[in-house]
Each structure stands twice: as structure tokens, then as C-alpha cells.
Image (cartoon, helix red, strand yellow):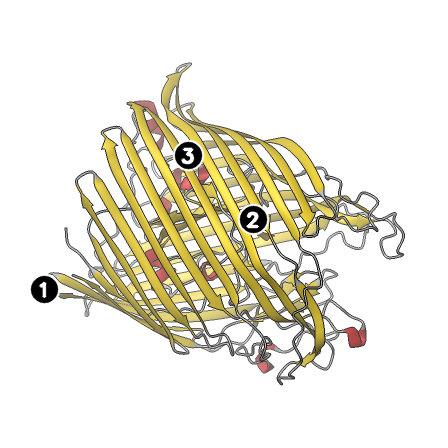
Amino acid sequence: MATHTTFQFRRRMRPHRLALATLAACLGSGLTAPVCAQDAVQTVTISGRNSANAASVAGFGDIPVSRSPFSASVITTRQLADAGIGGLADITRLDAGITDAYNAPGYWGQLAVRGFTLENRSNYRRDGLPINAETVLPQANKQSLEVLKGTSGLQAGVSSPGGLVNLVVKRPTGTVRQLTLGWADDASLGAAIDLGDRSGAFGWRLNAAYDHLQPPTDASRGHSRLLALAVDAQVTPGLLVEAEIESSRQVQPSTPGFSVLGDRVPDAGASDPRTNLNQQPWRLPVVMAGRTGSLRLTQTLGKDLQLSLHAMRQRLDSDDRIAFPSGCSAEERFDRYCSDGTFDLYDFRSEGERRTTDALDVALSGRALALGLAHQFTAGLLFSRHEARFNRQAFNYVGTGRIGALVVTPADPSLTDENTDRDEKSTELRLQDLVVLTPEMSAWIGLRHSRLDRRSERTDGSRPIAYEQSFTTPWLALSHAVGPNGMAYASWGRGVETEVAPNRSRYANAGEALPALQSRQIEFGYKHRTALLDWTVAAFDIRRPTWSDLGPCDSGADGCVRAIDGSARHRGIEAEVEWRAGAWNLRGSAMALKARREGAADAAINGLRPTNVPASSLKVQAAYNVAYVPGLALLGFVTHEGRRMVLPDNSLDTPGWTRLDLALRYAQRLGSRQVVWRAGIDNVANARAWKEAPFQFGHAYLYPLQPRSLHVSAQMDL
């Protein structure tokens, strides 16, 4: 098998089969087989036909997305490389249903799906097992990212209703020799290596990467590194053993956001997107280190039956530190900066943070005939444990800062506040069944029962809280084949989130376990796939209860109660189309979203939009393969998002914005070798806009579009 080496200069700103004839008839017509990518010298495609890929996070095995009754995206590393994407946060450029939700450079990213912010402690998976995403998630040893959209109660015991993100680890595939070098504005440099081989029943894959990070943002220089090894062995004809380990570390100052100035949103065109308000001489970088290891055993028990055991441990160690701008005490407005561009500045430090996640999943899957119907089923039991340990923290006022001018203040690293340690144990039983009712119609049935045991206390032993909860989250879908190329479906499902009332003295129900938030989603969709054209459309309706503080919460009395107060309802339409004709490959996705508060005790809140959620978004990618220069492709990426609300009362908003990125890819043959060159300009027009407006920690923040930047790449197969 040919080996290959890759030289890539990339932007670092933040890339068994069907055994039953009846089941094959339902899912067949050739639609269950993935379509192989064509040779890069001949053509370049934008999506890599991701509709033909399976989204393993959904739990229905090898059924491709194009024949599944849910919305999902499978984003491959090739897509990320062509778009110049080096971090998880930038996948928002490729799918209209995914948007930013507080993506501070130099810090861990947060995403929103269908307008709901994904919870970093519960909405992320790694090869299907739960992980904590309160860290930087390295991409160099990942082969794809899967994004499942909508209520995810079938796939996760506790999660916010937007969906799930699953990182798929690179596994041994054969002989691989890949070297990656990188450069981008402003002098970011990187090197990575991807090696692998297979000898008989044993295979291995090694990934290592190092990056010197120097993005255009001021005072944000840092570095990151990754070392990962995956091995597998076919011990017996029916037993496959897979193991892998990953170690990563990133050291980089984080970038706080701008904010509302008094009663106005500052002009993005007059604000320098390179400005970093975290420039005090005493500021320290954020350090995020992670170690993850997993072991998976897959035993074939018969022609149509398989048993798997999958265990994983993740250990995260962090030092969270920043010169943090927050509020304006001079005007007694603590959710924004002052009218004159000044702000209160705090010395925040939380060092020695440790987060550990353990997971063990036991699953039995197979195919069978029962009651005259074909079934594809999975029964599984997932045990997981999350532990978070912290030290005392600093959050000390050190003076006043100003936008546009560095005002040096003294440091105050005194550890003046307690933190909160957390423990959670979860046992989840799941059952899934794909039932073929007729050659055209199938029923998709899922049920998950979860039992939680949660405990927390402050780092000084005060405010202990312990509670247990159990709940069941069902999911049901019907799909109907429409001719040889189409499928219509309808689905309904539930999800769950849990919380306790804050343990401050003003709450009458302080420390009590609150009822679980039972979200639900209804979705109707249609998918169509041919050799030249793929298109999908889905309409969804998600309703999730919301928490509010009710009663005399501002008077200092103890009658304040944390309780369910109405709901958030997100209704929308998503559409996606991909067209392939001759030298052209075009892909576009769009979402129109109506997100509103309903049924709140305060009537003034009802009908308002949530903050930082665009009402519309459009993402377009295009590739043109130049016939006169074989191997040359011109690429274009258009991202548009509508206006966002900045404040909960909807009194201020940010305008919509559009960004254009251009790139080219040239693949040439040098004998038996192939070299692929890439070059690109991000934000070609150097557009100035507020990319997102997160309202976090009771404060409004604004993050700008990054300025125009360059990236170049070269990829060689040996």
C-alpha cells in the first residue's frame, strides 16, 4: 500500500453488513453503501457526500444519514482542511444549524444547535462515550465530527436539547505516513505527524502535533501539543480488541469579549478586532491539559449478533486565569461596560482544576426476525462517573480598564472565594429497535432509563448537597421510502436536564433538587438523494421548561424560590442541498428559527427572543475543478447569520453579517507521488461585525469577526 506524507500550512485561528433480505429491501437500492471519495487530482468535492456516512452517535449502526429519520451532520477532516478549520468552534462555517455560543479565543469553545447552547459537561461524546468538553478538544487524531441535532434523550441521560457532538478517533487503517507543517497570520507555526501500519492481525496509528500559536489577536501568543496512539488486534476471528490513548496540552492567554457601552452597542466597524482586553503585565495564560484512554472489545457471537464492551477514562487538568473585564460600578450597571468605554477589571484565578470522567458501556446488537418482522436492535448499559475537584479561587477587583488604551492595574491573586466540588454517578439502560414494517415503511423505537446520583459541596466543606433522580426518555420515528431515492419521516422524543436550587441564603428552597426539565421535540422531514443532487428539509418544534427566581428576590428576604417558569420554544425549518455536475460541486444549508419564551409569570418576558440566537443563517460552500489545469480546484465559502439579541429584554441587538472566504487546492502527480497545495484568504472583504453576542454570567459580551487572514498548504503522498 502506498504511503503518503502531508505538508500543510493551515490557519490556526480557531478541521455487518445487512443480513436480512427484508431489511436490505427497506434500506437498500444501494443507498446504504458509502460513496468513495474520488482521487483528489481528478476532482474536489465540498462535502465528501457526508449524507452517505453513518452518524454512529445516533446508535443505529451503519445506517447512512440519508436514510435515517433524524438530522445530523458528519464533518470529515478533509472538509476541515479544505476550509482551513483547525478548531471545533469554526465548524459553524459549515452548517447553518450550528452557531457560536461564547467562543472566546484561547478558551474552550461552546456551540449552539437549533438555538440551544450545548452543555460542555453533558452534550459531548468521544467514540460514543461521554466526555467533559470544558477543555480544548484536539482535532489532529480525529477522523470526523458528528453533530446530531435535536433532543438527544435517546443518546444521553442528561443533555441540553440542541443535540450532541461526537468526536470519532482515527483508528488503524493500513499504511499511513503523513507529516503536517503549518503557517498562518500572524506567524502561527505548526507541525504534525500521522503514522500507521498493519501487520497481519495487528494495526497501529500514531498522531503527534505541536503548534506555536500567534493569531492576529493582540497578546495571545501560546502553544499546544498532542500525542496519541491507537492500536487494534484481531485476537481471534470473532474478537477485535481496540485501545487508544491521547495526551494534549494548550497554553495560551484567553481573549475576553467587548460589551455594550452604556445604552448602545458599539460600532463594530470602529472597533479593532485584534484588541485583547486581557493585556495586564501580570496576566497568565490559560493552561488546559488532558489525558484520555479507552479500550474496546467487540465479540461476534454469531452471524447476526455482536457484543461490545467499551471503557474510557478522561482526566483534565486546568489553570484558568485572566485579567477579566466585567461590569461598570461607576454607573452601577453590572451587565455591561461603562458609557465611556471603561470597565471594572478583576484578577481571576482558579488553578489546579481537575475533572475526571469514567465510562463503561456494554452493548448487545444484532438482527433478527420476530413476529414476521425484521429487527435491527441494540440493548446497552452505560455506567459513568464524573468528578470535579477545585481549589479556592481569586476574583478580586483591581481597578478600571479602558477599551483602546492599556491602563495598568496592580495584581491581586489572593484566594478570596470558595469553589464547588462535584460528583455524579449515572446508570443508563437503553433499548433501540429498527423494525421493518413493510418494504417501504420502518419504525424506529428507542427507550433510555437513567438513574443519577449527584453530590456537591464547597471547597471548605460548606453547603453540601446530595440528591438522586430517575427518569425515562423515549424516542419514536416512522420513515417511509418515497421511490428509490427519497424518504419521508416523522419523529418525537424527549430529553432531560437536572438542577438544584442555588444554595444562597435568600432562596427558600436552597439546595433542594428541582424537578427534572423534560424537553420534547417533534420533527418532520424529507430526504432525497441521487447521483447528482442531494437535498433535505426538516421542520422541528422543541419545547424546554426554563428556571426563574420567583418571589421577593431583590428585597433581601428569604422568600425567593427557584422554580420552573414557563418554557423556551424553538420552532424552525432547516434545509440542505448538494449539487454535483461536471466540474461544479455546490453545497448549501439554511435555517429559519423562531425562538421565544412562553408561559412565564412575568408577561413582559413572553414572546421575547433569547440572546445570541440568530433568527436565520445561511452557509454555502462551492468547488470548481478547472478543466484546463487538472487537479486545480477553486473553493468558496459564504457564511451569513442574522441579527442577534444582546440583552434579555431585547432592547439591544447586533446586525446580521456576511463573510466570504476563498481558497484553492492544486493536486499534482510527481511520479507515483501526489502533492496537494492549498492556499486561502479568510474574510476576503475584511468585514467588520459582531460575530456573536453571548449573555453569560449575567453579563453581555460581544465578539468580533476575525480580520482578513491568509493560509497556505502543501500535501504530499509518498
What residue is disc 3 on?
A: 60
Pointer 2: residues within 10 angstroms few (<14), some, or many (20+)? some
Above or below, 343 against 581 in this view is below
Residue type at mark 3 is Phe
Which of 582/160 is in front? 160
Q: The residue tagged with tag 2: helix, strand or loop? A: loop
Q: Compare marks 1 and 3 and give the one earlier in the sequence.
A: 3
Q: CA distance from mark 1 to mark 3?
A: 43 Å
What residue is disc 2 on?
A: 121
Nearer to us of marks 2 and 1 is 2
Q: Compare marks 2 and 1 and give the one earlier in the sequence.
A: 2
Q: Residue at x 46, y 60 (%)?
A: 619
Q: Residue at x 66, y 59 (%)?
A: 392
What residue is disc 1 on?
A: 671
Rendered image quadrant of residue 370 = top left
Q: CA distance from mark 2 to mark 3?
A: 24 Å
Q: Compare marks 2 and 3 and give the one earlier in the sequence.
A: 3
Which of 530/373 is in front? 373
Rendered image quadrant of residue 450 = top right
User: Do we see residue 659 in this rendering?
Assistant: yes
Above or below, 700 against 313 in this view is below
Residue type at mark 2 is Arg
Which of 321/175 is in front? 321
Which of 638/666 is in front? 666
* Labelled disc at residue 410: none
Assess whether mark 3 and mark 2 are in contact (beta carbons under 8 angstroms): no
